[in-house]
Image: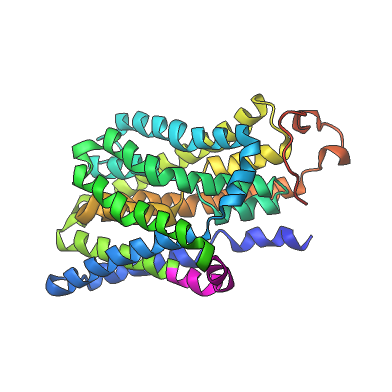
């Protein structure tokens, strides 16, 4: 029963408070002139370090073991990189009634980023879902997103993406893909060090993202970009994101049922397929949008906090659900022989 209390601490994410504080700092004291150049260089190095550590952490063996549950992973990837972008494109009809064009570009970018890893695993564990599958699904999504997100951005955002161009693709390769592959190659020698110092390196991760956010929002403030966002437009964005999240939560839960996945797998698909990664999205936006990244990441930051709050409520409910063998009415959740994956207790 102790595990049931954990979600109550999840809705108010302290890291979101730090992110908002960083945005406030950039609004009051933006980096300008030579300082802006220094922060820009440091941000570039931080992004490369971040993805190097991602590569060093990802266990190739775990990823290969997870391939045996390929139907679940294909479903999550389809939700993340197919259904989400389609809904993002459909939201274009809301411009300019609810959204400005820059906010819509940020919303569309939000639909292109990979799924979360840590929070999806935590929610899946508390709700008694398929934790091994959640670990693999998050890892696969992050890995695929390094390549797919920039490609989708090139196709769907194009030159209207606030500076997105062929140079941005080169930047993605040099700042994200090359460090990630280097981390994978060197994992054989540094994997143990990374595992032993996971907590300390976690602070490096978060500090790097804060640096990226400060640099992006400083550039936005210097260009007067915040004059484009009114409270009314911000409210419209929140409404659109709430609808987007609700649609994805319903699609992932009932769609997985229609595909005859068991209860544990449906939980994994719902949490992994309906969420977007702030940790992966912020650095990518910094590379893709440059000085326009401040507005591009605003929808992602808001959606991230919203998904934590809503999924925490859902987790409480799922954790109280009787398992199929514990009560009646479990026929719809009984896993079929084909779809049954590894169970987690």
- Residue 128 percent across, percent down from the top left: 73, 49
Dominant secondary structure (helix, strand or loop) of the stretch shown in magenta = helix
- Between 58 and 80, the one nearer to me in the picture: 58
- Between 321 and 267, the one nearer to me in the picture: 267
- Residue 219 percent across, percent down from the top left: 20, 62
The magenta region covers 191-204
- Residue 5 percent across, percent down from the top left: 70, 61
- Residue at 53% x, 62% y is 188
Q: Where is 66 relative to 224, above or below?
A: above
Q: How is the image coloured?
A: rainbow
Quarter that holds the N terminus: bottom right
Q: Is residue 324 magenta?
A: no
- Between 192 and 302, the one nearer to me in the picture: 192
Residue 229 visible (yes or no): no
Question: Seen in the image, is 108 located left or right of residue 206?
Answer: left
Q: Where is 111 relative to 3, above or below?
A: above
> How many numbered tags mark residues here?
0
The residue sitting at the left extreme is 33
- Residue at 73% x, 43% y is 342
Q: Is residue 202 magenta?
A: yes
- Residue at 86% x, 33% y is 328
Question: Seen in the image, is 173 located left or right of residue 181?
Answer: left
Question: Seen in the image, is 89 located left or right of residue 322?
Answer: left
- Residue 144 percent across, percent down from the top left: 45, 42
Q: Where is 112 relative to 193, above or below?
A: above
Q: Where is 23 relative to 122, above or below?
A: below
Residue 332 visible (yes or no): yes
Question: Seen in the image, is 41 located left or right of residue 1?
Answer: left
């Amino acid at each position: 029963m102790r595990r049931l209390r954990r979600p109550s601490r999840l809705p108010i994410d302290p890291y979101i408070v730090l992110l908002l504080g960083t945005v406030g700092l950039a609004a009051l004291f933006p980096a300008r002139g030579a300082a802006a150049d220094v922060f820009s260089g440091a941000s570039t190095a931080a992004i490369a370090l971040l993805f190097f550590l991602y590569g060093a952490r990802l266990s190739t063996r775990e990823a290969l073991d997870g391939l045996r549950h390929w139907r679940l992973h294909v479903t999550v990837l389809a939700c993340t990189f197919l259904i989400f972008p389609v809904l993002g494109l459909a939201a274009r009809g809301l411009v300019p009634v609810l959204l400005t064009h820059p906010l819509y570009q940020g919303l569309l970018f939000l639909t292109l980023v990979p799924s979360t890893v840590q929070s999806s695993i935590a929610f899946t564990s508390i709700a008694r879902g398929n934790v091994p599958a959640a670990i693999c699904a998050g890892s696969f999504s992050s890995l695929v997103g390094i390549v797919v997100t920039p490609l989708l951005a090139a196709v769907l955002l194009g030159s209207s993406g606030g500076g997105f161009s062929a140079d941005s693709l080169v930047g993605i390769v040099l700042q994200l893909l090359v460090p990630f592959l280097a981390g994978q190659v060197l994992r054989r020698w540094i994997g143990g060090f990374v595992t032993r110092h996971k907590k300390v390196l976690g602070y490096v991760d978060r500090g790097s993202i804060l640096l990226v956010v400060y640099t992006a929002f400083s550039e936005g403030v210097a260009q007067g970009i915040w004059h484009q966002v009114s409270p009314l437009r911000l409210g419209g964005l929140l409404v659109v994101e709430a609808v987007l999240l609700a649609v994805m939560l319903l699609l992932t839960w009932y769609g997985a049922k229609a595909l005859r996945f068991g209860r544990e797998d449906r939980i994994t698909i719902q949490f992994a397929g309906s969420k977007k990664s702030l940790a992966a999205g912020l650095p990518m936006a910094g590379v893709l949008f440059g000085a326009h990244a401040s507005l591009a990441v605003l929808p992602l930051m808001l959606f991230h906090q919203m998904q934590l709050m809503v999924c925490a409520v859902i987790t409480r409910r799922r954790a109280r659900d009787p398992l199929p063998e514990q009560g009646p009415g479990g026929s719809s959740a009984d896993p079929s022989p084909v779809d049954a994956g590894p169970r987690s207790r």
